[in-house]
Image (tube, helix red, strand yellow):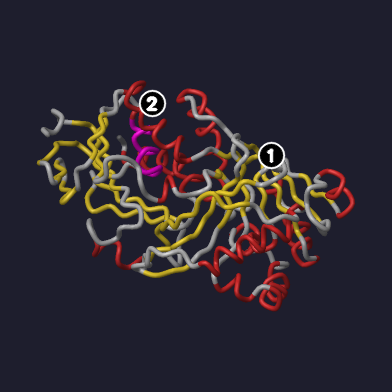
Amino acid sequence: MSLPAGPFDVAVVGAGVVGLAHALACARRGLSVVVIDRDTRANGASIRNFGFVTVSGQEEGAMWRRARRSRDVWLDLAAAAGIPIHQRGMLLAARRPEAAAVLESFAAGPMAEGCELLGREASARRFPGLAGGVAAALVSPHELRVEPREAIPRIAAHLAAAHGVTFVWGAAVTSVEPGEVGTSRGSLAARQTVVAPGDDATALFPDLLAPFGLTRCKLQMMRVRPSRPALPHVLMSDLSLLRYGGFAALPASGALRARLERDAGPELAAGIHLIVAAARDGTCVIGDSHVYDPTPDPFADSAIDRMILDSYEALLGERPAVTESWTGTYASAPATPVVVVAPAPEIRVVTVATGAGMSCSFALAEEIVEAMGS
């Protein structure tokens, strides 16, 4: 199959959410864009997650600002591309008093703007579906949730139909030089190139990426069918407070970590924190876990699935039927949530090195495209 005629203003390598975000940012500037992906459709981290655009709890500073801006882009894009928003807002239910103290500390700070802190009795009245009551709850209005399996393909289709973005599927990129992208099906000419490699730090520019210590994070997730209607917001709980930088950085989180090390050592070791994200068909996506390895195996650990289901049952009072399960991987770096390198003035390599690709990519792409002077 022949490659499309060029040259293009911008070539984007990778059709996950990071690549699509850059294609959108460039297309909105009136640039001609080609997106190249080695697979025949999106098949990686961008479709294997919750589709949860998280704002409250993001690390203070750039990541929090990016999440707020990306949420706004998601709202515009969802309307334009016909992407259903399945849930809005987040409910963080604190089961332990130490977790309630973290929520109280967060609620007193500037990043809690618009959020509502509920005590034990108010939480029970507002959310009677929570089993056994909770010590406190934080309700954030800022989040939204899409189904990534439908959202990512619809973004690509919208970019092609509304912005004239060209997609080249099933072509592995083998080289990127100023002005030229080499693929397994030939070469394309492009004035600038953005490489969005996902969790692959070895195929392109490995020497530049090596200092960041990138590895892979393997996660396990399930789709379940509860017997009762889901809560109105995406649900998280105590273990989540140690996974999100905006909560984990608070001094009160130290006592929570010590409590969880006593109460939930195996869950901490497996990087488990409960997220329950509902779909309109009555199912919920639940998870997840975090195990780090440069080459993680593809196999789901049944013990990890049981611990996730145990966490669900403890908070919601039932053990739902599992209809589907899967694993995924994403890139992770020990010291930074975002890796950006510039092999040349016309080239950027961009990796979201944490599980926040859905939450921050659109704002990040706008920053990078602006900085490149595209």
In the picture as drawn, the residue positioned furthest to the top comes out as 162
Please report whichever mark, 1 or 2, sits nearer to the chain's N-terminal start.
1
Pointer 1: what residue?
141
Q: Amino acid at mark 1?
A: Pro
The structure residue drawn at horizontal position 29% and vertical position 28%, both measured from the top left corner, is 165
Comparing 242 with 153, the one in front is: 153
Q: Nearer the viewer, mark 1 or mark 2?
A: 2
Q: Classify residue 124 as left or right of residue 147.
A: right
Q: Classify residue 3 as left or right of residue 88.
A: left
Residue 108's label in the rendered image is none
Q: Amino acid at mark 2?
A: His
Instruction: Locate residue 92, reporting x and y percent.
Output: 71, 52
Under circle 1, the secondary element is strand
Q: Residues within 10 Å of mark 1 (few under 14, many from 20)?
A: some
The structure residue drawn at horizontal position 77% and vertical position 53%, both measured from the top left corner, is 108
Under circle 2, the secondary element is helix
Name which quarter of the figure residue 17 lies in. top left
User: Is the stretch drawn in magenta largely helix, strand or loop?
Assistant: helix
Q: Classify residue 175 as left or right of residue 157.
A: left
Q: Classify residue 126 as left or right of residue 80.
A: right
Name which quarter of the figure residue 298 lies in. bottom left
Magenta span includes 19: yes
- The stretch in magenta equals 16-26
Distance CA(mark 1)–CA(mark 2)? 27 Å
Instruction: Locate residue 79, reporting x and y percent.
Output: 52, 24
Magenta span includes 346: no
Comparing 131 with 83, the one in front is: 131
Pointer 2: what residue?
158
The structure residue drawn at horizontal position 60% and vertical position 34%, both measured from the top left corner, is 280
Instruction: Locate residue 374, reporting x and y percent.
Output: 30, 34
In the picture, the quarter occupied by the N terminus is top left
Please tell me whether residue 312 is drawn above or below residue 225 in the rendered image. Answer: below
